Amino acid sequence: MAEIIDMPKLSDTMSVGTLVKWNVKEGQAVAFGDILGEVETDKATMELSCTVPGTILKIYAPAGSQLPVGAPICAIGKKGEAAPAPGQAAPAPKAAAPAIPESTGIPCLPPAPAASAAPATQSDGSRAKVSPYAKRMAEKAAINAGALAGSGPGGRVVARDVTAAASAPATTAPTGPLNVAVAPPADGKGIQPDADVPVGGMRQTIARRLLESKITVPHFYLEVEVDAAPLMAMRESLNKRLAEAGGAEAVKLSVNDFILKASAEALRRVPAVNASWAGTSIRQHSAVHLSFGVALEDGLVTPVIRDAHAKTLKDIAVEAKSLIGKARSKKLSPAEMSGSTFTVTNLGMFGVTGFFGIINVPNAAILSVGATIKKPVVDAHDRLVVGHRMVIGLSGDHRVVDGANGAQFLQALKQLLEEPALMLI
Amino acid sequence: MPVISYREALRAAMREELKRDEKVVIMGEEVAQFNGAYKVTEGLLKEFGPKRVVDTPISEAGFIGLGIGASMLGIRPVMELMFWSFSYVAFDQIVNNAGNIRYMSGGLINCPIVIRGPANGGTNVGATHSHTPEAILASHPGIKVVCPATPYDAKGLLKAAIRDNDPVYVMENTILYNDKGEVPDEDYIVPLGVADVKRVGTDLTIVAHGRAVITSLKAAEILEQEHGVSVEVVDLRSIRPLDEETILASVRKTHRALLVEENKPFCGVDAQVAYLIQSKAFDELDAPIHRVSSIDAPQIYCKRLEDQQLPDVNRVVREALKVLA
């Protein structure tokens, strides 16, 4: 009896999936555990495992098609059996989980189809034909060559197409739904060519979740300035030690690692901030699962360090590095991107002196760290001296965290950062 | 400047070199008393005598070997082959004894031989007389191969070949023998391994050698007049050593390349040129490299068909328009 394999629900928030590629074809025998193909969700691309041994009778979803969860994608049965017609409507996705949706973080950008980073892809995901010279020109002009209509043989995009696109006043991308007619600027050239850039999975999800956060969470903002000199000193001396020890001990601690550790400790002291709004209750979390922002080429992901309250500074540093590496090579698993109770973001490396992030629902707060800058400060003896100051912002969910709690948390954090030895007790 | 024929230019080169260097000797079938099968050596026996201009028996393996041996002992022979098609009976001499000797003797022996003669189809002489072996010869390290397309290049390249201390094989063309062009009276050479941009353009690069250059120049005219396209024509002049930089500089300018050759396509000269361009100028290409070669069949004997077999102007124009599409 043939079985129809449906588009699986690979994550709580998944509603549609794209069948990126098939590893098997009709008529092929498959065993339990064989990887049938790859499915792209709103967060990552996952392997589709075979759970029904047999022969692939029919593939309903051709590579590249996007289907709702529960829609039939293939049929497996005995060799020679007729493939069943995939008539039934897709079953409704599982009812939403109780009260708290799992914090899912900002999803990873799904890897480009066919694992090729370089070639331009057209809107339907197929490989665009672009001459080498045109590709070079397009890169220089910051134009997506694959989105252009090619006038060369076989629809190949050639140099003249790129030249036309670069100098055209109105947008020429044929795949954009909107053709915004923009009056050409007076001098004929803008700061970059007009373009309708198609929005991919990651950006869609960022847009949806952050809008949801901004609209539904009553944000309030607190700021504290921290004397970063003691932290710098400790960091330098610890890094020197670790470098001398060498081998397995050779981890370089970053400022962010210290802030992650200090945040976990500050949450231990002010646990009210390590909580989530649950409608009719507030859920206090026993563990601190810290997520932190990693900037990617065209977006951002927030991998999670679980049980940060129980990890040493070094453990946190090692784990953070590994997660950053995975984030950059798009290899984070959904488990590594979900379940946080608190988020830390840091724009100090970009010179931003202070800011307030948007809460990563269902966290109750988000910590935003700025750059350490030298500035004149008044010391304990009322003297004007050079200080190394770091501004830290806290955006809080006022349903869960009151001003006083938030302030206490920042006070604890400031203490821990200014007297790092306190993290030992 | 005097305007003379390709044939006369070759003759002038030989005459001047015979005068300049007493070691230069012209040898071949019918070169002396008959004044040359194609009259290229006309008058040379009269001027220089039988010790400088020598008739040989009809035995290419024999007399090429004779020339090679003489060259190892200090003579500078300029051997004529009535057709390069006849070189195959002397192939071992040409490729092994001449081509390898400097290498195999560790530099102790060199072979300053020149072998020259017509290497062309288009004269209705059939499959065994119409070979264009420039690619085959050029695939042997130790051998140099040149293909003059104009009287100016013919005189300059032959002189350079005669003065070179290693084997240089000159591919001439009986159809070009009557072409006229400006050729200086005085001594000059065209260096081996230097290509020549015969026509400057901006939209398309045509790379050609030998008579295909002349065909390409005609096609370029048509492309300009009737299609408004500006075509650059690069004449390789030397097949080996190959002037890579002139080819690449042209492709970098025009971004499209069409290769035209009278030799047969498989492993022809343009196969090498195409590899070169995609290897070293890939990112400059706005279109795939196109190629017009002789049609891949033994040289056709029926005249009307043979005319179609060689790349003609219309075929070059059509292919050029495809590259520009």
Image (spheres, grey):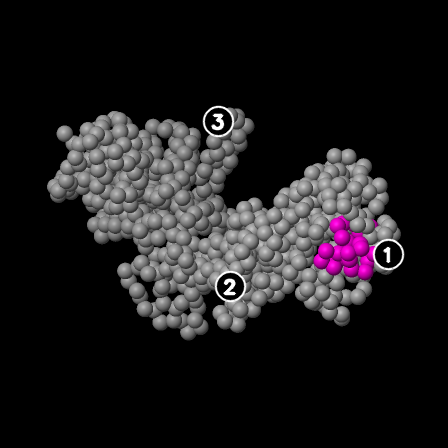
Residue B31 part of the magenta segment: yes
Crowdedness near tag 2: few (<14), some (14–19) or many (≥20) residues, C-alpha within 10 Å: some
- Which residue appears at 67% of the width and 54% of the height? B118
Disc 2 and disc 1 on one polypeptide chain: yes
Q: Secondary structure at mark 2?
A: helix
Q: Main secondary structure of the magenta part?
A: loop
Work out which quarter of the rendered image holds the N terminus of chain A and state it: top left
Location of residue A202 with respect to A281 vertically, above or below: below
Tag in front: 2 or 3: 2
Q: Mark 3 falls on what kind of element?
A: helix
Q: Position of residue B130 (x, y in %)?
A: 61, 51
Q: Which comes sooner in the sequence, label 2 or label 1?
A: 1
**Badge 1 amino acid:** Phe
Q: Are marks 2 and 1 in contact (CB under 8 Å)?
A: no
Asked if the magenta segment contains residue B324, the reply would be: no
Chain label for disc 1: B
Q: Nearer the viewer, residue A238 or A292?
A: A292
Residue for badge 1: B48
Q: Residues within 10 Å of mark 1 (few under 14, many from 20)?
A: some
Numbered mark located on residue A326 in the image: none
Q: Chain of mark 3?
A: A
Query: Range of the magenta residues?
Result: B25-45
Question: Of the residues shown, which amino acid type is indicated by label 3?
Answer: Glu
Quarter of the figure that contains the C terminus of chain A = top left
| Res B314 label | 2
Residue at the outermost left position = A88
Q: Residue A249: which numbered mark, if any?
A: 3
Nearest-to-viewer mark from 2 and 1: 1
> Could you tell me residue B199's position as x and y percent?
61, 65
Q: Amino acid at mark 2?
A: Asn
The span from disc 2 to disc 3 (Cα, nearest Å) is 74 Å
Residue drawn 52% across and 52% down?
A: B295
